[in-house]
Image (cartoon, rainbow, N blue to C red):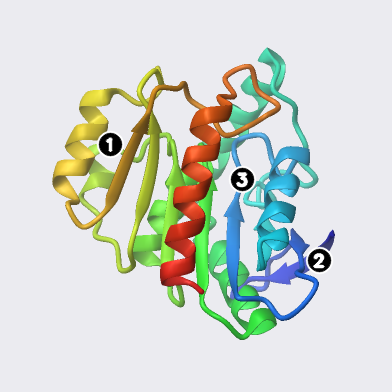
């Protein structure tokens, strides 16, 4: 259902994105933002799933500015490599990878002719939150267990679009105090907490929780149907 395409940011940087298209005219578009493991088989399957539900899905490589063709698994060495790559990207001069996310949003809008939402997982959840606050042309944002999203710097941001945020109550990377502080600071956002661990949506991780994943997925689809199409 999907294929790789090259996108170009405003600064001329060329990077790959996985694009999954619908069988017919799309009802809307979704930019899918990766975990720290790259646009791997899981993220490509997520994009394909959105396409099966009627959305043009675009999953840009947000690691491309520091390393090309990242496709990691979920073992300890993969985790270390992914965290190092994330740190390298986070260390880029501002605006970091936001131009690449913006290019993906623009491409999704042009290709679909419809509204665009963003959904991100793990580090991609943090990027989805930043996009909700800083990017142009979005209609909705759905961060899943965004690492760092509850920091003071991120909580201080103000979203421009409706936000639906998913968290796991057993997530050792994101404290429940942080989640509650985020929710209190952003009453305009819908915040849901599930009896699950970090990464509960990924069926390739030991932390996968089917009940939480399906519950969050249906909430996400209803949210996108309301705000994207």
Q: Is residue 213 left or right of residue 3?
A: left
Please state the horizontal and vertical placement of residue 42, each as a whole percent of the image: 72, 39
**Marks 1/3: CA distance?**
20 Å
- Circle 1 is placed at which residue position? 151
Please state the horizontal and vertical placement of residue 69, each as a whole percent of the image: 80, 45
Residue nearest the observer in this picture, 182 or 194? 194
Please state the horizontal and vertical placement of residue 227, each as a whole percent of the image: 42, 70
Q: Is residue 5 left or right of residue 76?
A: right
**Marks 2/1: CA distance?**
34 Å
Q: What numbered label is drawn on residue 34? A: 3
Judge whether 93 appears above or below 200 on screen: below
Q: Secondary structure at mark 3?
A: loop
- Circle 2 is placed at which residue position? 5
Query: In this rendering, does residue 95 appear at all?
Result: no
Judge whether 182 appears above or below 175 on screen: below
Task: Residue 178: name its quadrant.
Answer: top left
**Marks 3/2: CA distance?**
16 Å
Q: Residue placed at 26% from the left, 54% from the top?
A: 189
Please state the horizontal and vertical placement of residue 229, each as a whole percent of the image: 51, 74
Crowding around mark 1 (Cα neighbors within 10 Å: few <14, some 14 to 19, many 20+) is: some
Q: Quadrant of the N terminus?
A: bottom right
């Amino acid at each position: 259902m999907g294929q790789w395409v090259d996108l170009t940011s405003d600064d001329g940087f060329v990077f790959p994105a996985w694009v999954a298209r619908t069988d017919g005219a799309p009802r809307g578009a979704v930019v899918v933002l990766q975990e720290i493991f790259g646009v791997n088989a899981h993220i490509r399957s997520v994009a394909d799933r959105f396409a099966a539900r009627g959305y043009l899905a675009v999953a840009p490589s947000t690691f491309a500015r520091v390393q090309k063709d990242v496709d990691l698994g979920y073992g300890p060495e993969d985790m270390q490599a992914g965290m190092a790559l994330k740190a390298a990207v986070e260390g880029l001069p501002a605006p970091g990878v936001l131009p690449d996310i913006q290019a993906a949003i623009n491409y999704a809008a042009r290709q679909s002719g419809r509204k665009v939402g963003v959904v991100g997982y793990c580090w991609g959840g943090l990027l989805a939150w930043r996009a909700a606050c800083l990017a142009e042309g979005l209609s909705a944002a759905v961060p899943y267990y965004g690492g760092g999203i509850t920091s003071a710097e991120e909580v201080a941001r103000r979203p421009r679009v409706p936000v639906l945020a998913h968290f796991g109550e057993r997530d050792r990377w994101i404290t429940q105090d942080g989640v509650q502080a985020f929710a209190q600071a952003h009453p305009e956002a819908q915040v849901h907490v599930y009896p699950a661990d970090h990464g509960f949506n990924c069926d390739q991780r030991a932390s996968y929780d089917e009940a939480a994943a399906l519950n969050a997925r249906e909430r996400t689809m209803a949210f996108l149907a309301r705000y994207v199409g």
